[in-house]
Amino acid sequence: MKLRLMRTAWGIGGALRADAGRAVERLRAAGYHGLEASLDDIGATRKDRLAFVREARAQVRMGVRG
């Protein structure tokens, strides 16, 4: 069993939404495996949330390593 280290981002909203790719890159560089946030933190609408997820996934696929 692998232990995954997640960073909580509840309540930081705008800063997180501003640049999902950069946020994921910084978390991975700090040693985290992922991000846990409320839906409101990643976007106000479904469209915004999907855009955030696409951008975050793109960073992971690029193999960003810390």
Image: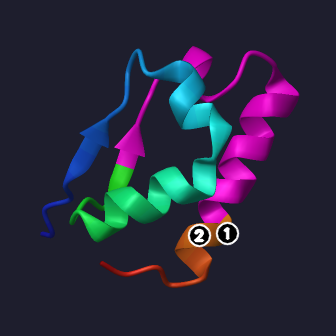
Of helix, strand and loop, which mostly describes the magenta segment?
helix
Horizontal side, residue 7 vs residue 40: left or right: left
Q: Is residue 41 above or below residue 61?
A: above
The residue sitting at the right extreme is: 47
Q: In the drawing, what numbered circle is on residue 20?
A: none
Which residue in the structure is indicated by mark 2? 59
Residue at x 21%, y 59% (from the top left corner): 4
Name the residue located 61 percent from the left edge and 29 percent from the top edge.
42
Numbered circle sitting on residue 58 = 1
Spot occupied by residue 37 in the image (x, y as percentages of width and height) = 44, 29
Q: Which residues are magenta?
A: 35-57
Q: Amino acid at mark 2?
A: Gln
Residue 37 counted in the magenta span:
yes
Asked if the residues shown at circle 2 and circle 1 are in contact, with their CB atoms under 8 angstroms apart, the answer is yes
Q: Residue at x 60, y 83 (%)?
A: 62
For the N terminus, which image quadrant? bottom left
Q: Position of residue 12 (x, y in %)?
A: 43, 22
